[in-house]
Amino acid sequence: MPGDPVANIVGAEAGLEEAQLAAIRAQLGLDLPPLRQYALYLGALLRGDFGTSYHFHAGVASLILSRIGWTLLLVGPSVLIGAALGAFLGARSGWNPRRAGSRISYAAALAVSSTPPYFLALLLLYLLSFRLGLFPLKGFYSSGGFPDVLHHLALPVTVLSLFSTARDLTVMRGSMIREKGRPYVTFARAKGAADGRALLRHALRNASLPLATMAAMDLGFLFGGALFVEIAFSMNGMGTLIYEAVKARDYPVLQGAFLAVSLTVLAGNVLADALYAVLDPRVRVRQ
Amino acid sequence: MRQRRLIFIAASLALVLTCPASWARAQGEAKAAPAVLRIGTPNEVKVPNIFTDYYLGLFAHVSNPPLMRMTSDGTLTGLVAESWAVSADNTVWTFTVRDDLYWSDGMKLTAEDVRFSVEYTGTNNAAARWIKDTLKESRVEGRNAVFAFTKPYAALALEFATYIILPKHVWEGVKDPARYSNPDGNVGCGPFVVERVDTASGAVRFGRNPYWKGARPKIDGYEVQCYKNAEVLALALEKGDVDTYYAYAASYPYAGIERLKSTGRFEFVEKANLGLPLLAFNLKKAPFDDRDFRDAFSYALDYAEIAKLDALGYGKTATRGFVPPGMGGYAEKPALVHDPVRARELLSAAGYRDGNGNGWLEDRAGKEMTLSILIRAEQSRVAELVKDYLSKVGIRAEIRSLDMNAWVAAKDRYDYGLTIARTTPWGMLMHAGWGTGYFDSRRTGQGVLHVLDDPVFLDLADRILAVADPVKRESFAAEVQDYYARELPGIALYWNMAVTPYNKAFSGWRPDPLYGIYNIETLTAVERNKG
């Protein structure tokens, strides 16, 4: 990445002499060889010290802690809503792919997936918040309290949910079309299972397997996708933290944020593995 | 059955969405009673620390006022300082602290608070490192805070209009300010104090300082509401979520002014902006090291059109003197003129001709010449215009658009021909003043061009820096502007107005050239109109 973190630290309006900048660089250890800097970073990390942000001028751990909770509150429901709605609509669409409703829902999912998140966020914000006054224009809350937070989160969660629903719907639809042609579904029908029962009791569970993986991966994707929603709704979450850290060459924040995101995605994957065991008896650990 | 289920789902959704909405509205109405001014800003507060957060530090100028301030006519006057004096050699500065200032916890502000704040800032603020490097001694003599520096710095009083004063009894316990967080209960000595910094809601709330002895504010408090994007901030203003707009060193977007006017609910404060769009030459590189080329170049640009298209009626053609009329010491210089024919004649006379007849000029050695215009994305419209004007006089140019960091890196490597950027009000005042801080080659920093190492200019800057008397300093202003007009190290593409919209429900706005409407004068005078 081109750019000097020290230039960002002193800001656009400070005019210092080169010797003064060199002193600041030395004070931060930025004059050390990269490997030595990395070793120092790892050593500090082992002591639980995530470092100090160059750009935000605050402890990295406290910065991440102050933001990750809000982002999870934004992303978590979106992943769950997306998985639930995507599974439901995708299963229906894949079970009867030629019905008009199935085609419409699939086309809508493709349209949403192809829309830039920032554009959709601004469009809904303009219509529902500005024109109709149903939702606030910014922030996680105004006065605080659960109803206030819920009111502020409703629209951004809706936007993110639309994207995760669209993604999950297309995956589920494809998976259901594949499962529907399997012999066990034909066998269930031959036994006299009604259409709905064959779908819900037999095909849905197997068709959901790729979705479980998808939902876990979504955690990582939505951290990035949340950036646009955070900017549109002026929310201070992980997306904007990473974005601003990249702009300011704030390496300590980037290292800390990527660690936090990686751990969240790993946790999501562990959950997905556990869910797999519930959904698919074949992968359960045998005693 | 299915229909009933759908109706039930829709009704539940409506209930979930509207209940919190009406609850929140009720809360808002309940809180609408006190006269609270809501200021919308794109200047984001990122951490709850008035010392380390750039924009919170700027907003804290009202709660923790600096020693000095700038009046609406640009004159420097005391704020925490009642008076100030400087030794004959401009190295020892004495600030007499006002006797009627009290911190919001009831303690009296003393000269020791001032001494502590200056030392603390020099030690802990990287941008103020010059204090640490040049402050020889600081001491308190009664109500006087005395600072002795190793070398003269005549612009110190101006510099001290930007650093906030901290309560020593609070901040002496903060050894590492970068790890300090104080969202609630900041202690200030201004008319208002920072009551709550809430980064999750994107708001900073200011309440009255109960120990303030100055002019009684006419509002009960104010909020700074931070927005991450300009479009939504404009909607918030129109919707009535905020009463006014503030952005440091910037105007309300010109393109949005007509829309606000059409609502009939807004008035506008217009103030000549000290910051300006700048076209700067890389003086260390040919052909820009050639004054004749720069002179010819200046005739190629259509300044009126640039001002019309970029400032939408809020800009006007600048002079060769660069310095805008709103700045103290402004001197009338010849206007920049658009005359492509003259530009061609001057270029030809200076040895830049189209020898091979391909329509593009070659340099003096007869080599093909392509100028590199270095910009950041926000300058792309002006850059396209400049490129077009240059092509009309036979100069080929290419645009390199980079992000902020890459732009700074390229600029510091002198890897460009010319660049288009913006100066800020403080940038125009810093160093020896009148924009010298941008050009002086001995300085470095993110927005600084450091391209001018002409001994005549450096000597002029040093002479200004050695004089503290504001009247004498202004006598140098004409000399600086003469130099700019003669040598053209940079061109002011236009001078512009800083426009601030405000809801007609409020009145009493008093902008200053440094911080616009965000100053103690405005915030103690602004009031909600009766009826």
Image (cartoon, coloured by chain):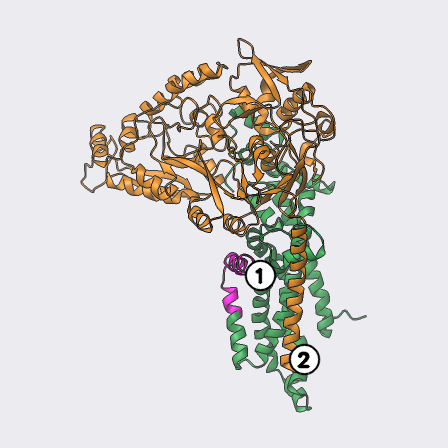
Q: Which chain is green?
A: A
Residue at mark 1:
A159
Q: Secondary structure at mark 1?
A: helix
Of residues B380 and A132, which is closer to you in this image? A132
Of residues B51 and B510, which is closer to you in this image? B510
In which quadrant is the C terminus of chain A drawn? bottom right
Look at the image and tell me whether residue B42 can be seen.
Answer: no
Residue at mark 2:
A200
Examine the structure image and report whether residue B387 is included in the region drawn in magenta. no
Q: Chain of mark 1?
A: A
Please count the marks in the image.
2
Chain B: give its colour: orange
Q: Is residue A158 above or below residue B461?
A: below
**In the visual, does B529 lie left or right of A286?**
left
What's the magenta region?
A109-131
**In the visual, does A235 lie left or right of B281?**
right
Question: Disc 2 residue type?
Answer: Leu
